[in-house]
Amino acid sequence: MRLYFCLFLFGLFIWNSAWADDIPCDTAKDARYEILGDFNYDFGDVDIQNDSIFTVFYVKSVGDAPMLILNGSTTCPCTQVAFTQDIVQPGDTVGIIVTYHPIHSGPFKQSATVSTNTKPYSYFRVLIKGNVVEAVSKD
């Protein structure tokens, strides 16, 4: 029985290898990105009574292939990251929205990491910082 199973797997491998040669694959195309502007944002003083604050970082697809936004992660549950689109065609720009929810007074520094299909780096990181205060004067 084990022999038949091994022969089956070998046959499947040979069939798959022959079939894969028929699939066009352009390995010369690479997805690449360029962060437009700064990858840091300083909110300055933020009133603790704000429900949330956000900023948008813009990233341009500059490669020969579409850039895919695979996922995003942050350093704290008080920070979220979202995207205006998941597939960015060459020459197009995507907005990376980073939202912070002030939960206590004092300085904060958070980052959001976005995973992509780009080369040579498959991710990029943007940073936000600020200072949460009890009340911001409107002078």
Image (tube, rainbow, N blue to C red):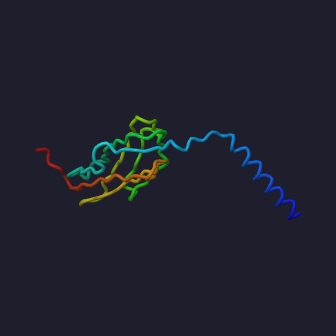
Q: Quadrant of residue 105?
A: bottom left
Q: Which one is in front, 117 or 22?
A: 22
Name the image quarter holding the C terminus.
Answer: top left
Q: Please determine whether, in this image, residue 19 is positioned above or below residue 124.
A: above
Q: Which residue in the rendered view is the most extreme toward the bottom?
A: 2
Q: Residue at x 40, y 44 (%)?
A: 33
From the top left corner, tell me how far across and down residue 96 is, in percent. 38, 44
In-image side of 72 versus 98 (left or right):
right
In-image side of 106 versus 125 (left or right):
left
Q: Which residue in the rendered view is the most extreme toward the right?
A: 1
Q: Which one is in front, 120 or 124?
A: 120
Q: Which one is in front, 94 or 129?
A: 94
From the top left corner, tell me how far across and down residue 58 is, in percent. 34, 41
From the top left corner, tell me how far across and down residue 8 is, in percent. 83, 55
In-image side of 51 versus 9 (left or right):
left
Instruction: Count the numbered circles shown.
Output: 0
Q: Residue at x 39, y 52 (%)?
A: 124
Q: Residue at x 44, y 36 (%)?
A: 90
Name the image quarter holding the N terminus.
Answer: bottom right
Q: Which one is in front, 83 or 51?
A: 83
From the top left corner, tell me how far across and down residue 100 is, in percent. 33, 51
Q: Please determine whether, in this image, residue 105 is positioned above or below residue 33.
A: below
